[in-house]
Image (cartoon, helix red, strand yellow):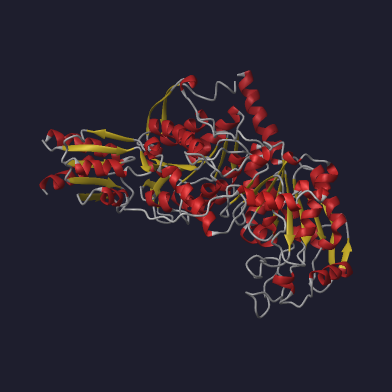
Amino acid sequence: MSRDREVLTGEHFLNGDEACAEGAIAAGCRFFAGYPITPATEIAERMARRLPEVSGVYIQMEDEIASMAAVLGASWGGTKSMTATSGPGFSLMMENIGLGMMMETPCVVVNIMRGGPSTGLPTLVGQADVMQARWGSHGDYGVIALTPSSPQESFDFTIRAFDLSERFRLPVFLLSDEMVGHMYEKVVIPAKSTIKLLRRTKPRKSGQEFFPFQAGKDLVPPMACAGEGYRIHVTGLTHDEQGYPLITADAQERLIRRLCDKIRVNTDEIIQIEEIDTKGAEIVVVAYGCTARSAQEAVQIAQRNGVRVGFLRLLTVWPFPDKKIRELSRAGVRTFVVPEINYGQVAREVERCADGKEVILAARMGGAVHTPEMILEAIEEAARG
Amino acid sequence: MRYMLYEPKSFHAGEAQERIDKTHGLHPDDRYLKPGRIPHIWCPGCGLGIVLTAFIKAIDGLEIPIDRCAVVSGIGCTGRVAGYLNMDTYHTTHGRAIPFATGLKIAKPEMEVVVFSGDGDLFAIGGNHFIHGARRNMDLTVICVNNFNFGMTGGQSGPTTHMTAKTSTTPYGNCEYPFNLTHLAFASGATYVARWTTFHARYLIDSIKRAFEKKGFKFIEVISPCPTGYGRPNRLGSGLDEMKSYRDRSVIRNRIDPIDAPLEWKGPMVVGEFVDREKPTFLDRYREDILSRVQEGSRSA
């Protein structure tokens, strides 16, 4: 029975949170440690109900700090693990996210963004944690963040998040938002056999010859989990290739560059974007999450009105698609329109890469999604300029 | 943006190997220690060497396979124990060893998961995690080395610092009440609670062995000298002087309520095995109450 319940193949009517939980289970996640927080609580609730069905363990920790620590511990025990939260919990998790980055621990951290800062708008949408996802913990490290725009994508991207975390050995963020998390839509869950899952690379060398933080060309070391006989030391301190603390500038230089470069040199494998009618466009709307849905409608209306506008949807927001933005600016795009539910976070990234081309930020601070008309207004403003 | 980076020295496995060849393996306990990592960083007179050795002797005495053990530590001098042990060890963030160990234990229930940390790490920043770990009765052995201060950062006061004691952040004397850690552990739900000092090394080995033989949340407090951080500002003498003081002031009382086991600064120190009881662990309950019922229910469905 346990096997039938792993992948609920078929058509479902689910909200983004529920779809995310199903994606996790389909990806092989068998440990969830979390703390209730609106609007992510439904993920915890569904995991609490579903994990025992597949012989997994759900544990509600005393706070988000403990949740993130437990997720790392379980991953080092060899189990795919996940937690889910929103802004205030994301802030609490930051220190241990840094630990996960430093220890290179595969796991998934879901942030169903809501209005902030602080307690903010617990029940309403926001998108203002994008920069926090990139820079939230102290120090330098590479980041992967996926941005679903629908419950279907919440399912699909959670599986992808697990794959990427296993492939690159780091906590991967699913950066969703309250609108996507709480909206109900059709979710098609495929047959189990069609879901190909990635798993962390195991060491080939044995015992003493294995240096747990020494990597090959792809900059990702194989991972030895607890009890497998490798007897490794894993620390949050700066360490050498053997994993032992080494408090020197040289060790820092080697380690930190690798932690950042393992993402930087693999962006082609990681970045996913959706382009519609960007070829020959003068204006390109760049959007993600729930905003992308209104943006797509706005672009269609503008096109019908004769505006040469294209649409770029970000399925991954980190790493940021620098190359694509630069390419579009050089191909004739005059203006980028960036609607987002924050005071300009992705817009700054677009501006950074846009080679001096104009960027119009269509911002809402939080609590409501842009209507297509609002975004259309910005497109028309771009067309006038 | 163009990058200008500076070439670091590359990694040399050879240097470490030389040190290993010269010094490792001479002592029978060496197989429990990571090659090339001794000498350790602790101060002369520190009790951590004794606690580490007691731990090794307990595992050796019970013949527990090294690969069945995992140690999780926090930040502080005690936290550095993890780096010296030749087993899977995790040096995590300040105060968060117990939740990390919780996740590890759940993923690898067949392993002995030990948390090794200090009074500041476990009871200041880690206090909340300690009481919940005990409340859940997670099957963990928690060894807390209590030196009454935050030693690693230079000797600041902490939740076990004695009233009136001098530390670098209590230059006029500490005015706060300290915890009775054994009382806190018992009240939170621990199944085994013991307190020893580094003078009581043999009792400590036996206690750790007893902890390995039991299930549940096991707590062992070990009082240790810290001549650098605590002894010097309070004129307690050398590490050896402090141990003599433990010998002279300690009284062993087993099977008592820890509330009756105070730790007077200049008076009696009550040590012993205070609590030793049985209670189903978190995983026992999860498997019995939840997993089996859910799987059972689905079988009959």
Q: Position of residue B279 (x, y in %)?
A: 77, 42
**Vertical placement of residue A165 versus A356, above or below:** above
Front residue (pair B121, A51): B121
Q: How many marks?
A: 0
Front position in the image: B216 or A277: A277
Residue B72 drawn at (x, y percent): 67, 49
Residue B193 visible to the viewer:
no
Residue drawn where x is 56% and y is 50% of the image: B11
Using residue A289 as the reference point, say whether residue A133 is left or right of it: right
Q: Which residue is nearer to you in this view: A12 or A302? A: A302
| Residue B60, percent from left and from top | 82, 45
Quadrant of image for the N terminus of chain A: top right
Q: Residue at x 40, y 46 (%)?
A: A113
Q: Which quadrant of the view contains residue A224?
A: top right
In the rendered view, would you say A268 is above or below A346?
above
Image position of A92 (left or right of A182): right
Residue B59 appears in view: yes
Q: Position of residue B274 (x, y in %)?
A: 83, 55
Picture layout, residue B194 above or below residue B250: above
